[in-house]
Image (spheres, rainbow, N blue to C red):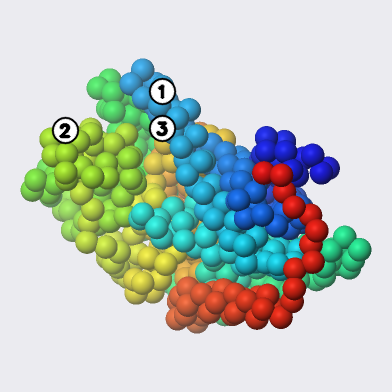
Amino acid sequence: MAGWLTGRWKSFALFAVLGALVGTGQAPLSLPWVSVAALGLGFALFALVPAPKAAAWRGWAMGVGYVVATMFWIVEPFFVDPWRHGWLAPAALLAHAGGFALFWALAFGCAAWLGRLRWQRALWGAVLLAAVEMLRSHLWTGFPWALIGHVWVGQPQMHLVALGGPHLLTLFTTLAAAIPAALGIRRAALGVLAALAFLALPVPYGLWRLGQEVEPRAPQTIRLVQPNAAQHLKWTEEMIPVFFERLISLSAQAPEGPKPDLVVWPETSLAYLLAPGNGTAQVVADAAQGAPVVVGVQRRDGDFARNSLAVITPGADVTEYYDKSHLVPFGEYMPGASWLGSWAPGGLAEAVMQGFAPGDGLRLIRLGEGFEGVLPLICYEAIFAEEIIAAPRPEWIIHITNDAWFGRLSGPYQHLAQARLRAVEQGVPVLRAANTGISAVIDAQGRVLGSLPLGEAGVLDVTLPPRLATAPPYRVWGDWGVLVLLVLGGVVLGVARSRVKPVDPLASSD
């Protein structure tokens, strides 16, 4: 084992494999216990390495393995048009994994520098890994995808997000994984039992939240439309009318139960020009047979291109627009495009050379009679918990997305998992219409009440679930609670460091 710890490339391979195993807790595998065990072993082995440089190398390796295992779907957009962009896919994955793994390197390197003893290094690693996961969620517009705490989606532990958001869930996970390493090999059995007891602490709270009182609501039926328009065909001249006709046919389909009160189409589902009273709006309105229709559109707003949600009334008027405000870097716009002017490419998802322009921020909108106070989210916006709690608490969240960009292996499942966390954090239902899936209705406790499978066309008629009567604490505290815990953890470990002398004899050859 010493060779695997001290050899540069052997240690890289070992920690990269451990990082990949940590990633098995993410959807669609959803193996949180494997994830925690692998992270715990990583902490235990890292704690044997006191040299900061060597520890940072191992942290980087573990981060590379984790990112490749959980976010390999980022290559999918490059193969929508493989002749133009396919050659960029390997470089994009390597750059993505190597870049985000630097956060893990920072956490492990600083933990080795701050911790004199093995147990200190393990606990510092837990605190700092949670801190850098929070940092990468905000830095450079943020990317809080596949946070370590997301492994608990679908388990009672996920309800910790109602108290302190996704970063509290991550801190809880890293601390649990570090407990056996902190207690040491001689007390390994005790360490495992202590970790299991710690992991069980939130279970009663999660079960209690599942039975919380909800607000009464008049029955309302919403139809989610999933056209299953493949991304490589979606904008071709011959397929645009085919997919439009499919959307119209699905919207007009006779319901098995009550007539829909609202029809929802996915992100960028409408390829035609939309204006009040024009032919396109009239056809859409007629198909809905008296119900308002929410559609995803690309539109021109003066000199700007927008990725928008629009509401078409039964009279074919367009009464509301919401413009996506948190855009995808390199997908919907190119960072630094304002400096390059007309030379700037628009990004993988946008044909206009300057890319999309952001909207004015999250806000509540009205979708029609009886559908006031709804928070719209377009695709990527659903992953930013801290931005959503900054908006007024909605009656419910509507999430339109085109997850065809994410492939069919893991990306769409992970996106759905994050929508479930948003429901728990807000205490409100989330209804999502996805182009190729997974369209779903999620209740205020994060349970999926109904869904359409990935890669199938169809409709899902659902009764809008009620929201919780009381807003979760996270809406009041935001991320301040977990920030306080991180600072307290650092203070306690800092005091412990000042009162002990280093005794570890093991040094690294790196």
Q: Nearer the viewer, residue 290 or 346?
A: 346
Neighbours of disc 2 within 10 Å: few (<14), some (14-19), many (20+): few
In the shown orientation, is residue 483 left or right of residue 55?
A: left
Across and down, in percent, residue 146 comes to 55, 51
Residue 231 visible? The answer is yes
CA distance separating discs 3 and 2:
22 Å
Neighbours of disc 3 within 10 Å: few (<14), some (14-19), many (20+): many
Across and down, in percent, residue 230 comes to 41, 29
* Residue 449, numbered circle: none
* Residue 343, numbered circle: 2
Q: Quadrant of the N terminus?
A: top right
User: How many badges with numbers are in the image?
Assistant: 3
CA distance separating discs 3 and 1:
9 Å
Q: Which residue is mark 1?
A: 86
Does dot 1 land on a helix, a strand or a loop? helix
Across and down, in percent, residue 183 comes to 82, 68
- Residue ID at (39%, 41%): 402
Give the image quarter of residue 362: bottom left
Of the two numbered discs 1 and 2 on the same chain, state the one appearing first in sequence: 1
Does dot 2 land on a helix, a strand or a loop? helix
Neighbours of disc 1 within 10 Å: few (<14), some (14-19), many (20+): some
Which marked residue is nearer to the observer: mark 1 or mark 2? 2
Of the two numbered discs 3 and 2 on the same chain, state the one appearing first in sequence: 3
In the shown orientation, is residue 187 left or right of residue 484?
A: right
- Residue ID at (57%, 73%): 486
Q: Which residue is mark 3?
A: 77
